[in-house]
Amino acid sequence: MMSKKKILIIEDESDIAEMIAMRLKKEGFLVQTAGNGHSGWRNIGEFQPDILLLDLMLPGMSGLEILKLVRADRRKGSLPVLILSAKGDESDIVVGLEIGADDYLTKPFSMAVLVARIHALLRRSTGTAGAEGNLVEVGNIVIDLDGHRVWIDDIPVEPILTLTEFRLLAALVLARGRVLTRNQLIDQAIGSDAIVTDRTIDVHLNALRGKLGASRNRIETVRGVGYRMGSF
C-alpha cells in the first residue's frame, strides 16, 4: 500500500492552519502544523514532509528565512515549497520565486485551488518531464533524472536545485537542442496549476544558471522565441 504523503503547514494564524489541516486530512494527507518560524524549521527536520506550505510573515523567523535555510541544506534542498501569503503584488511573488519557492498562493484562497496546487507539486516531484529514470549527459553536465541529482565535471551541483529548477534543466536537456518556448517550459516544468507571471520562467532560469556556475551559458536564450540547451 502506498504511504500517505506528509504536509507541513507553517502558519501563525491558527484558524487558517486548522482549516487547511482539516481539509488536507480529508484528502488523505498526513498533516502537521507549526505556529512560528523556529518550531516550523525544527519540524521540517523531525517530520520530514513531502511538501511545505509556508507563510511569509511569521513570528521568530520569517518564511523567507526558512526558505533560504531549506534551499541551503543538502538534505532538505529539493523539498517542494508552496508559499501562502497575503502579499500578492508581482514583486512579492518574484522575491519568493527568486529565493526558491516552487509556487505561490495569495490569501485569501479557496481550498479547492490549494489542493489542486498541492497535487500539481506532487506530480512534479514524482516525475521529471516524462522521463524514465536514467542518467543524461550534455557536455560536462550529468543529470540523474530519477534521483534529482546534477553533476558538473563530476562535482555535485550545490546548492541543490529546487524542484522547479531541476525540471527546467531536465526539460531543456531532453529537448536535445530544440528551442522550447516559455509556454512549453511552463507546461513541462511547472504545470498549468502553478502560479505564472510574466517573469516566472526568467526568475527560475536565472537561478538555475547561477547554480550551474561556469556552465551557465549552456542554457542559451533565443530572443523572441525561448530557450535551448547548447552543445548537443
Image (cartoon, rainbow, N blue to C red):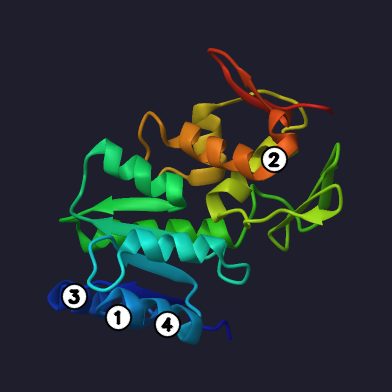
Q: Which mark is residue 19?
A: 3
Which residue type does callout 4 highlight? Arg
Left or right side of 205 for 65: left
Q: Is residue 112 visible?
A: yes
Which of the numbered marks, if any, corresponds to residue 229? none
Identified by mark 2, the residue type is: Gly
Q: Residues within 10 Å of mark 1 (few under 14, many from 20)?
A: many
Q: Is residue 137 above or below residue 45?
A: above
Q: Nearer the viewer, mark 4 or mark 1?
A: 4
Q: Amino acid at mark 1?
A: Ala
**Residue 34 circle label:** 1
Q: Quadrant of the N terminus?
A: bottom right
Numbered tag placed on residue 213 in the rendering:
2
> Which circle's residue, 2 or 4, is located before the other in the chain?
4
Judging from the image, what secondary structure is the residue with disc 4 in? helix
The residues bearing labels 4 and 1 have C-alpha atoms spaced at a distance of: 9 Å
| Callouts 2 and 3 close, C-beta under 8 Å | no
> Taking 34 as reference, is 155 left or right?
right
Residue indicated by mark 4: 42
